[in-house]
């Protein structure tokens, strides 16, 4: 009876090929892989403040403990629905300001004020400068975003549009809101679509695998940013025949390839 000996070198080669294929796939999955060697620069570590843009919704209020009547004259009060007589509170609600296409809002007793391109602290300082002449002491000006939203689309588990209450969110937090990427999402090619104050739209790419993402000017998102996770080649190839069929064909192909390779080694 003839016995066929499999050469140790051939077996070693097969194992190495399988290990390399496995490592290549794994390297595309973890985030911030080189974090041990990463050191953030002081300039990049500063939180990027979001800026006011045309078509934003804002609340603007002026508060004074010594002259409440003067302060109220600068506040835009929302109309009250008199048909709802059982109101739970007598506190008047502030009406939202819509930033127009030119980046301006109209404040009572002040007129048009250009806020586009300013951060919230800068906007508060500008409005304070406009109204402080009517007070014996400096009033308090509070400006807040009403509609600070970001959208996450593509290969994530829960795509959608999310409202950010504190006006600060980074790309990792945004993906967490969308319950992380699916196995088909490309970690090294996440796109951020951003519209500037001038209306120009730009697309930026970030690599979640690289720790230098933390120093990226696109790490912190701006309001109305769209985060799009690109599907990988497996998802793209399987889109025509369905995920189940694609996985079946892939598994069958791998098995056939291994059997063929073993047959050639033995013979």
Image (cartoon, rainbow, N blue to C red):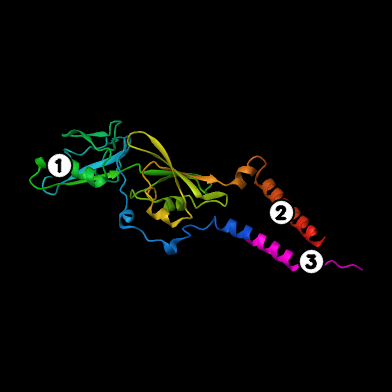
- Few, some or many C-alpha atoms within 10 Å of disc 3 (few <14, some 14-19, many ≥20)? few
Residue drawn 66% across the image and 63% down it: 16
Q: Quadrant of residue 58?
A: top left
Q: Residue 199: where, in percent of width, then height?
A: 36, 33
> Is the residue 188 above or below the residue 267 in the image?
above
Q: Earlier in the sequence, mark 3 or mark 1?
A: 3
Residue drawn 51% across the image and 48% down it: 158
Q: Is residue 256 visible?
A: yes
Residue with the mark numbered 1: 129
> Is the residue 52 above or below the residue 38 in the image?
above
Q: Earlier in the sequence, mark 2 or mark 1?
A: 1
Tell which tag, 3 or 1, sits nearer the viewer. Answer: 3
Q: Quadrant of residue 101?
A: top left
- Left or right: residue 35 versus residue 168 is right
Q: Nearer the viewer, residue 225 or 206?
A: 206
- The quarter of the image holding the N terminus is bottom right
Q: Residue 65: where, in percent of width, then height?
A: 14, 49
Tell which tag, 3 or 2, sits nearer the viewer. Answer: 3
Q: Is residue 194 magenta?
A: no
| Mark 3 → mark 1, Cα distance in angstroms | 86 Å
| Mark 3 → mark 2, Cα distance in angstroms | 21 Å
SS at badge 1: helix
Residue drawn 76% across the image and 57% down it: 261
Residue with the mark numbered 2: 254
Residue with the mark numbered 3: 6
Q: Residue 245: where, in percent of width, then height?
A: 69, 46
- The span shown in magenta is 1-19
Q: Kindly indicate whether the residue at mark 2 contacts the one at mark 3 (C-beta within 8 angstroms).
A: no
SS at badge 3: loop
């Amino acid at each position: 009876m003839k016995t066929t000996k499999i050469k140790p070198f051939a077996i070693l080669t097969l194992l190495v090929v399988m290990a390399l294929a496995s490592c290549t796939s794994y390297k595309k999955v973890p985030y911030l892989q080189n974090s041990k060697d990463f050191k953030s620069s002081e300039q990049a570590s500063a939180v990027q403040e979001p800026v006011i843009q045309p078509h934003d919704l804002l609340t603007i209020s002026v508060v004074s403990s010594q002259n409440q009547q003067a302060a109220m004259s600068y506040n835009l009060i929302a109309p009250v629905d008199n048909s709802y007589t059982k109101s739970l509170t007598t506190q008047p609600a502030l009406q939202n300001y819509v930033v127009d296409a030119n980046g301006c809002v109209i404040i009572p007793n002040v007129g048009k004020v250009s806020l586009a391109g300013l951060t919230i602290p800068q906007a508060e300082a500008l409005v304070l400068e406009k109204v402080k002449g009517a007070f014996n002491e400096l009033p308090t000006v509070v400006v807040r975003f009403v509609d600070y939203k970001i959208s996450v689309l593509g290969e994530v588990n829960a795509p959608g549009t999310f409202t950010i209450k504190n006006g600060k969110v980074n790309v990792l937090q945004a993906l967490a809101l969308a319950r992380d990427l699916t196995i088909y999402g490309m970690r090294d090619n996440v796109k951020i679509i951003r519209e500037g104050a001038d209306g120009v739209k730009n697309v930026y790419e970030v690599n979640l695998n690289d720790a230098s993402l933390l120093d990226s000017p696109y790490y912190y998102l701006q309001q109305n940013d769209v985060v799009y996770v690109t599907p990988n080649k497996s998802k793209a190839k399987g889109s025509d025949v369905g995920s189940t069929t694609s996985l079946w064909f892939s598994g069958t192909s791998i098995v056939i390839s291994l059997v063929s390779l073993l047959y050639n080694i033995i013979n």
